[in-house]
Amino acid sequence: MSVSSPPCVSVIMPVYNEAATVASVVGVVLRQPCVEELIIVDDCSSDGSWAELQKIAAAEPRVKIFHHEVNQGKGAALRTGISKATALLVLIQDADLEYDPNEYETLVGPILSGRADVVFGTRFAGGAHRVLYFWHSVGNKLLTMLSNMATNLNLTDMETCYKVFRREIVQKIGIEENRFGFEPEITAKVAKMEVRIYEVPISYYGRTYAEGKKINWRDGFSALRCIFRYNFLR
């Protein structure tokens, strides 16, 4: 996609206690030529994120903000945001600095060229990445393998944040998981739709828990449950 292409992407950004980084991330997102709108869902933050988002939305007409009165989880925030999307494509973006919005062109390229309907960004295919937790990488690869065995896909990074969909596809999917189970759930449901799925390499600048990382070992067990539930019980 060239920089002169018209805006065509609804970026969905769940936010929970990201006051320290959200303004920086929003700034980079809005500089991407393909972004038509940025839909931010604050999941009942307690650190001032909502006040920060209100200031951002007041100054930028492309930003639409929504607020959950009770904390529900990333999946619930995505469910709210996806339902509000109006652009041709829908892209998932976290509110921290782990993923780089400057790579949107790479992510949307296979869809805009007519080769794909869904694109996963993979952290395990040669992109630059921060060196962090060994057992996290083992867990990610194990969950991806188990998901692939169930879906018969050959993904390398099922748990990636960066996923792009044609809007009509993702809005057909009823998201049930409220937390990080969104990833294996959406993968299972997309696989059953028999759409064209691509992967592209992305960079990854992971955070430590001291820097605000939220996912934990319980979410790994939840992902196992979701792989079984959405592939074999539906």
Image (cartoon, helix red, strand yellow):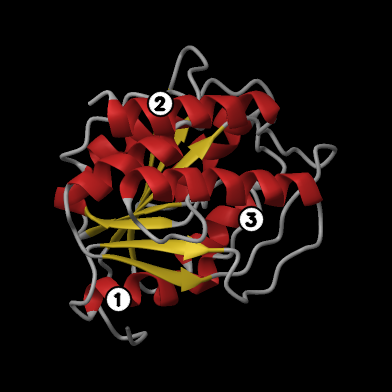
In front: label 1 or label 3: 1
Give the CA separation, mark 3 to mark 2: 23 Å
Q: Earlier in the sequence, mark 1 or mark 3?
A: 3
Q: Height in image: 233 above or below 172?
A: above
Depth check: give the residue in front, 96 or 51: 96
Which residue, as the protein is rendered here, is positioned at the far right? Answer: 210
Q: Which residue is mark 1?
A: 110
Task: Name the image quarter holding residue 136.
Answer: top right
Residue drawn at point x = 40 percent, y = 55 percent? 163
Above or below — where is 231 with respect to 30? Answer: above
Looking at the image, residue 59 sits to the left or right of residue 97; the answer is left
Say which of 64 and 234 sits in front.
234
Q: Residue furthest top?
A: 70
Mark 1 in CB contact with mark 2 (< 8 angstroms): no
Residue at position x 37%, y 85% from top? 3
Instruction: Residue under label 3, please give it.
Output: 24
Question: Quarter of the image containing the N terminus?
Answer: bottom left
Task: Indicate the position of residue 192 as horizontal and vertical percent values.
Answer: 20, 45
Count of numbered tags:
3
Is there any visible trace of residue 22 in the rendered image? no
Depth order, front residue of 232/77: 232
- Secondary structure of the residue carrying tag 1 is helix
Instruction: Indicate which disc, 1 or 2, sits on the residue closer to the N terminus.
Output: 2
Q: What secondary structure is found at the residue carrying circle 3?
A: helix
